[in-house]
Amino acid sequence: EAQVTQNPRYLITVTGKKLTVTCSQNMNHEYMSWYRQDPGLGLRQIYYSMNVEVTDKGDVPEGYKVSRKEKRNFPLILESPSPNQTSLYFCASSLSGRAYEQYFGPGTRLTVT
Amino acid sequence: AQSVTQLDSQVPVFEEAPVELRCNYSSSVSVYLFWYVQYPNQGLQLLLKYLSGSTLVKGINGFEAEFNKSQTSFHLRKPSVHISDTAEYFCAVSGGTGGFKTIFGAGTRLFVKA
Protein backbone atom coordinates (compact mmCIF):
# COMPACT_ATOMS: atom_id res chain seq x y z
CA GLU A 1 0.00 0.00 0.00
CA ALA A 2 1.31 3.42 -1.00
CA GLN A 3 1.77 5.49 2.11
CA VAL A 4 3.68 8.02 4.15
CA THR A 5 4.47 6.90 7.67
CA GLN A 6 5.53 9.01 10.62
CA ASN A 7 6.86 8.02 14.03
CA PRO A 8 6.07 8.61 16.74
CA ARG A 9 2.41 9.58 16.43
CA TYR A 10 2.38 11.22 19.86
CA LEU A 11 5.27 12.65 21.83
CA ILE A 12 5.49 14.58 25.07
CA THR A 13 8.93 15.90 25.91
CA VAL A 14 10.67 18.59 27.93
CA THR A 15 12.34 21.78 26.84
CA GLY A 16 15.82 21.25 25.45
CA LYS A 17 15.72 17.49 24.98
CA LYS A 18 16.70 16.66 21.41
CA LEU A 19 14.19 14.65 19.41
CA THR A 20 13.72 13.24 15.94
CA VAL A 21 10.47 12.58 14.12
CA THR A 22 10.88 10.09 11.34
CA CYS A 23 9.12 10.14 7.99
CA SER A 24 9.21 7.47 5.33
CA GLN A 25 7.46 7.03 1.98
CA ASN A 26 7.25 3.97 -0.25
CA MET A 27 6.21 5.66 -3.50
CA ASN A 28 9.68 6.56 -4.82
CA HIS A 29 8.74 10.24 -4.61
CA GLU A 30 11.41 12.85 -5.19
CA TYR A 31 9.77 15.64 -3.17
CA MET A 32 9.22 15.50 0.58
CA SER A 33 8.16 18.17 3.01
CA TRP A 34 7.42 18.92 6.66
CA TYR A 35 4.57 21.09 7.89
CA ARG A 36 3.28 22.19 11.23
CA GLN A 37 -0.41 22.77 11.82
CA ASP A 38 -1.59 25.24 14.43
CA PRO A 39 -5.18 26.39 15.09
CA GLY A 40 -6.12 29.38 12.97
CA LEU A 41 -2.85 29.29 11.04
CA GLY A 42 -3.40 26.32 8.76
CA LEU A 43 -0.33 24.41 7.63
CA ARG A 44 3.00 26.14 7.47
CA GLN A 45 5.92 24.61 5.62
CA ILE A 46 9.05 24.02 7.68
CA TYR A 47 11.46 22.44 5.19
CA TYR A 48 11.20 20.65 1.91
CA SER A 49 13.47 18.43 -0.14
CA MET A 50 13.48 18.12 -3.89
CA ASN A 51 15.71 15.04 -3.90
CA VAL A 52 18.46 13.27 -1.99
CA GLU A 53 20.85 15.79 -0.39
CA VAL A 54 18.74 18.72 -1.68
CA THR A 55 16.78 20.59 0.99
CA ASP A 56 15.49 24.12 1.37
CA LYS A 57 13.74 26.25 3.96
CA GLY A 58 10.03 26.76 4.04
CA ASP A 59 8.33 29.60 5.84
CA VAL A 60 9.05 28.55 9.44
CA PRO A 61 12.42 26.75 9.57
CA GLU A 62 13.76 28.25 12.81
CA GLY A 63 14.48 25.64 15.46
CA TYR A 64 14.31 22.69 13.05
CA LYS A 65 16.79 20.66 11.04
CA VAL A 66 16.29 18.09 8.31
CA SER A 67 18.38 15.73 6.26
CA ARG A 68 17.71 13.64 3.15
CA LYS A 69 20.28 10.92 2.89
CA GLU A 70 17.95 8.39 1.30
CA LYS A 71 15.12 9.01 -1.10
CA ARG A 72 12.49 7.36 1.10
CA ASN A 73 13.35 9.03 4.42
CA PHE A 74 13.13 12.64 5.57
CA PRO A 75 13.55 12.99 9.35
CA LEU A 76 12.73 16.19 11.23
CA ILE A 77 15.13 17.07 14.04
CA LEU A 78 14.45 19.42 16.93
CA GLU A 79 17.83 19.91 18.59
CA SER A 80 16.54 21.98 21.52
CA PRO A 81 12.74 21.93 21.56
CA SER A 82 10.86 24.81 23.11
CA PRO A 83 7.19 25.10 24.14
CA ASN A 84 6.39 27.18 21.05
CA GLN A 85 7.16 24.09 18.97
CA THR A 86 4.18 22.31 20.49
CA SER A 87 2.14 21.52 17.41
CA LEU A 88 0.79 18.89 15.04
CA TYR A 89 3.40 17.94 12.46
CA PHE A 90 2.77 16.43 9.04
CA CYS A 91 5.18 14.89 6.60
CA ALA A 92 4.19 14.80 2.93
CA SER A 93 5.62 13.55 -0.33
CA SER A 94 4.92 14.05 -4.01
CA LEU A 95 6.28 12.86 -7.29
CA SER A 96 8.13 16.05 -8.03
CA GLY A 97 6.71 19.01 -6.10
CA ARG A 98 4.90 22.08 -7.42
CA ALA A 99 2.31 20.69 -9.86
CA TYR A 100 1.93 17.34 -8.16
CA GLU A 101 -0.42 16.19 -5.42
CA GLN A 102 1.14 15.79 -2.00
CA TYR A 103 0.44 12.65 0.02
CA PHE A 104 0.32 13.26 3.75
CA GLY A 105 1.29 11.14 6.68
CA PRO A 106 -1.06 10.67 9.67
CA GLY A 107 0.60 13.39 11.75
CA THR A 108 2.70 13.59 14.91
CA ARG A 109 1.32 15.47 17.87
CA LEU A 110 4.21 16.99 19.80
CA THR A 111 3.93 18.59 23.22
CA VAL A 112 6.95 20.37 24.69
CA THR A 113 6.67 21.25 28.39
CA ALA B 1 5.61 36.91 -1.51
CA GLN B 2 2.77 34.63 -2.48
CA SER B 3 -0.10 34.19 -0.06
CA VAL B 4 -3.43 32.41 0.29
CA THR B 5 -6.49 33.80 2.07
CA GLN B 6 -9.45 31.67 2.94
CA LEU B 7 -12.22 34.12 3.55
CA ASP B 8 -14.31 32.09 5.98
CA SER B 9 -12.94 30.31 9.03
CA GLN B 10 -16.18 28.40 9.61
CA VAL B 11 -19.13 27.62 7.35
CA PRO B 12 -22.24 26.00 8.82
CA VAL B 13 -24.69 24.57 6.30
CA PHE B 14 -27.67 22.24 6.32
CA GLU B 15 -27.49 18.84 4.70
CA GLU B 16 -28.38 18.84 0.97
CA ALA B 17 -27.79 22.59 0.69
CA PRO B 18 -25.14 23.99 -1.68
CA VAL B 19 -21.89 25.35 -0.29
CA GLU B 20 -19.06 27.57 -1.48
CA LEU B 21 -15.73 27.84 0.31
CA ARG B 22 -13.79 30.89 -0.80
CA CYS B 23 -10.08 31.13 -1.53
CA ASN B 24 -8.12 34.09 -2.84
CA TYR B 25 -4.43 34.00 -3.64
CA SER B 26 -1.86 36.63 -4.42
CA SER B 27 0.79 36.07 -7.06
CA SER B 28 2.21 38.11 -9.89
CA VAL B 29 2.74 35.03 -12.07
CA SER B 30 0.98 31.77 -12.83
CA VAL B 31 0.73 29.29 -10.00
CA TYR B 32 -0.67 25.85 -9.28
CA LEU B 33 -3.73 25.71 -7.02
CA PHE B 34 -5.00 22.92 -4.82
CA TRP B 35 -7.82 22.11 -2.43
CA TYR B 36 -7.20 19.53 0.31
CA VAL B 37 -9.61 18.10 2.88
CA GLN B 38 -8.78 17.01 6.41
CA TYR B 39 -11.22 14.76 8.21
CA PRO B 40 -11.02 14.68 12.03
CA ASN B 41 -7.80 13.13 13.33
CA GLN B 42 -6.46 12.41 9.86
CA GLY B 43 -3.92 13.77 7.44
CA LEU B 44 -4.84 15.79 4.39
CA GLN B 45 -6.01 14.37 1.09
CA LEU B 46 -6.36 16.03 -2.29
CA LEU B 47 -9.80 17.10 -3.47
CA LEU B 48 -8.78 18.72 -6.75
CA LYS B 49 -6.12 20.82 -8.41
CA TYR B 50 -5.76 23.45 -11.12
CA LEU B 51 -2.63 23.43 -13.25
CA SER B 52 -3.75 25.06 -16.51
CA GLY B 53 -6.47 24.85 -19.15
CA SER B 54 -10.16 24.71 -18.32
CA THR B 55 -11.01 27.00 -15.43
CA LEU B 56 -13.62 24.62 -14.00
CA VAL B 57 -12.00 21.73 -12.22
CA LYS B 58 -13.86 18.69 -10.95
CA GLY B 59 -12.62 16.69 -8.01
CA ILE B 60 -13.61 13.81 -5.78
CA ASN B 61 -16.81 13.51 -3.75
CA GLY B 62 -18.77 15.85 -6.04
CA PHE B 63 -16.63 18.92 -5.38
CA GLU B 64 -15.58 21.37 -8.07
CA ALA B 65 -13.67 24.62 -8.15
CA GLU B 66 -13.42 27.54 -10.52
CA PHE B 67 -10.18 29.33 -11.26
CA ASN B 68 -10.63 33.04 -11.86
CA LYS B 69 -7.41 34.70 -12.93
CA SER B 70 -8.72 38.27 -12.95
CA GLN B 71 -10.01 37.95 -9.39
CA THR B 72 -7.16 35.66 -8.28
CA SER B 73 -9.69 33.31 -6.76
CA PHE B 74 -10.16 29.55 -6.62
CA HIS B 75 -13.47 28.95 -4.86
CA LEU B 76 -14.62 25.43 -3.98
CA ARG B 77 -18.24 24.42 -4.48
CA LYS B 78 -20.56 21.50 -3.96
CA PRO B 79 -24.20 21.57 -5.06
CA SER B 80 -25.51 19.36 -2.25
CA VAL B 81 -23.53 18.53 0.89
CA HIS B 82 -23.74 15.48 3.13
CA ILE B 83 -23.08 15.05 6.81
CA SER B 84 -19.91 13.19 5.84
CA ASP B 85 -18.51 16.36 4.22
CA THR B 86 -17.97 17.84 7.69
CA ALA B 87 -14.22 18.48 7.72
CA GLU B 88 -11.61 21.19 7.39
CA TYR B 89 -10.75 22.36 3.89
CA PHE B 90 -7.46 23.93 2.87
CA CYS B 91 -6.59 25.92 -0.22
CA ALA B 92 -2.93 25.82 -1.28
CA VAL B 93 -0.66 27.37 -3.90
CA SER B 94 2.71 26.31 -5.27
CA GLY B 95 5.00 27.28 -8.12
CA GLY B 96 5.20 30.85 -9.37
CA THR B 97 7.66 33.02 -7.47
CA GLY B 98 7.55 30.55 -4.58
CA GLY B 99 9.24 27.84 -6.61
CA PHE B 100 8.93 24.52 -4.81
CA LYS B 101 7.38 26.02 -1.69
CA THR B 102 3.73 25.31 -0.86
CA ILE B 103 1.63 27.94 0.87
CA PHE B 104 -1.57 26.87 2.62
CA GLY B 105 -4.48 28.99 3.70
CA ALA B 106 -5.65 29.00 7.31
CA GLY B 107 -8.44 26.55 6.55
CA THR B 108 -12.25 26.61 6.51
CA ARG B 109 -14.15 24.36 8.86
CA LEU B 110 -17.31 23.09 7.20
CA PHE B 111 -20.11 21.96 9.52
CA VAL B 112 -22.95 20.09 7.87
CA LYS B 113 -26.07 19.98 10.02
CA ALA B 114 -28.96 17.52 9.72
Image (cartoon, grey):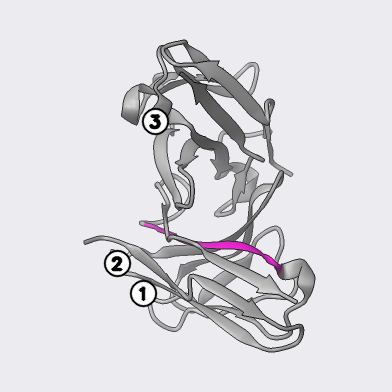
In the picture of the structure, the residue carrying the numbered disc 3 is B84
Residue A67: in magenta span? no
Asked which secondary structure carries label 1, the reply is: loop
Asked which secondary structure carries label 2, the reply is: loop
Residue A93: in magenta span? yes
Q: Are marks 1 and 3 on the same chain?
A: no
In the picture of the structure, the residue carrying the numbered disc 2 is A28
The image quadrant of residue A60 is: bottom right
Please give the chain letter of the residue carrying mark 3.
Answer: B
| Residue located 54% across and 27% down the image | B111
| Residue located 45% across and 54% down the image | A97
Q: Which of A27 and A4 is in front in this view?
A: A4
Mark linked to residue A72:
1
Q: Are marks 1 and 2 in contact (CB under 8 Å)?
A: yes
- Please provide the residue range marked out in magenta: A86-94
Q: Earlier in the sequence, mark 1 or mark 2?
A: 2
Q: In which quarter of the image is the N terminus of chain B?
A: top right
Instruction: Give, as a three-letter code, the residue at label 3.
Output: Ser
Residue A48 position, x and y percent, is 55, 64
Rounded to the nearest whole Å, what is the CA distance between mark 1 and mark 2? 7 Å
